[in-house]
Amino acid sequence: MGCGMISEEYLKNMIEKFSILDVVGCCDLDAEKATACAQQFGMEYMTMDEICADPTIEIVVNLSAPPAHYAIIKNLLLHGKNVYSEKTLTVDLSEAKELVELADEKGLYLGVAPDTFLGSSVQTARHAVKAGMIGKVTSCKAQVLRDRRILAQVVPFTTKLGCGIGFDVGIYYLTALLSILGPIELAAGFYAQNVHEDEHNDPSKPNYEEKYSVNSETIMSAAVRFSSGVLGTMMFNSDGIFPEQSELMLCGTEGVLTMGNPNDFGGKVYLQAKGNENRIELPCIYGFSGNERGLGVAEMAWAIRSKRPCRANKEMAYHALDVLHGIIESCQTSQFKKIDSSFRCMPPLPSGYLDENYYGANQESALR
Ligand SMILES: NC(=O)c1ccc[n+]([C@@H]2O[C@H](COP(=O)([O-])OP(=O)(O)OC[C@H]3O[C@@H](n4cnc5c(N)ncnc54)[C@H](O)[C@@H]3O)[C@@H](O)[C@H]2O)c1
């Protein structure tokens, strides 16, 4: 559902990488886009009604832009479909809650991106924490810097309220931290809402000199306390530059772990151990280190077949959204915001599935 920018990567991976997935059709409001996509990947162009009426379709993957998520997901759940959605679950928090409750009521799976935390970088870091390599974790830090004026040319929804840098990109950092450290109980934050008109400034693009309005949270910063007692700081800033600057770090009593950009699946993990002059690169002991978009869908499909919860699940996604809205509310009220939602940490993926060309176990075996 949604044949836009990210759909090609998803479709390529879902068709080629994961045997559990059998991709049958695509749909878009824009029939031309959907037809071209259907032709490119040798599948059927379907309408929403046709998808809803087809009992053989078990999962619908929602790749529309966030403002369309609520209506699409609700309709699919009401028609008995399991849904895997790109982030964020919805723009409005109360609508996200309604969808979580609806999926529970119907006994359907609702998986939500980001799934990059299932990649080798975050899984390796999680393993290092569990193995005690940095002692007791005491704090964490997440930071990303981007230039929203460039993004607005290619990802227009990032100019809308509830779709700014924290929601669009910060969520990768937040989800990575949640998957390792568990839920957050308290947030305090600031945000800058940049409301103005801007002009597309890339002469090579057809929309050059076109005006657009900006209404989004262009910077969000926060201090948070996890239920485990770990303290964290976050800074998500789109009033900056490209190349993107990214930092994701866990600090403990015995060392410091630095992960790769959590918008990617791979990325090196470094350990700075207490008393050692130099940091070392940790061997990557997990699979899924390339472009793995679609991994969360495949993991959910295996979860459906095995009748177990999926890892990129609605509870963690809702909690992440709750935290981001909590940061906004804290700024508006000048008060700490208690985060009411929570989630249960899912088990890590099994280690040892290194490369798809490795003799022996296929990477997908890790998802069974
Ligand atoms: N672009 C990226 O690099 C990127 C990366 C990771 C995740 N995502 C996420 O993927 C999703 C899509 O992003 P994108 O950049 O591909 O957006 P996009 O705007 O390029 O594509 C979205 C598509 O959804 C279609 N659409 C909108 N409403 C619809 C409806 N009601 N029914 C059917 N189709 C509908 C649009 O016509 C469009 O073709 C977002 O949730 C985004 O956060 C994007």
Image (cartoon, rainbow, N blue to C red):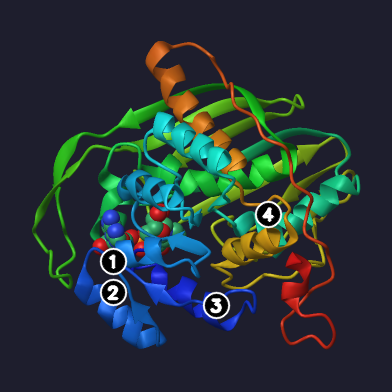
Q: Are marks 1 and 2 in contact (CB under 8 Å)?
A: yes
Where residue 11 appears, x then y in whole percent?
46, 75
- The secondary structure type at the circle numbered 3 is loop
Residue that numbered label 2 is attached to: 34
Of the pair 67 and 331, the residue shown nearer to us: 67
Residue 273 appears in the rendering: no
Tell me which label, 1 or 4, sits earlier in the chain.
1
Check disc 3 and give the amino acid type: Asp
Check disc 4 and give the amino acid type: Met
Q: Nearer the viewer, mark 2 or mark 3?
A: 3
Q: State the residue at coordinates (58%, 70%).
A: 292
Check disc 1 and give the amino acid type: Asp
Residue that numbered label 1 is attached to: 28
Residue that numbered label 3 is attached to: 22
Q: State the residue at coordinates (86%, 34%).
A: 136
For the residues labelled 1 and 2, the Cα–Cα distance comes to 5 Å
Tell me which label, 2 or 3, sits earlier in the chain.
3
Residue that numbered label 4 is attached to: 259
Q: Nearer the viewer, mark 1 or mark 4?
A: 1
Of the pair 205 and 93, the residue shown nearer to us: 93
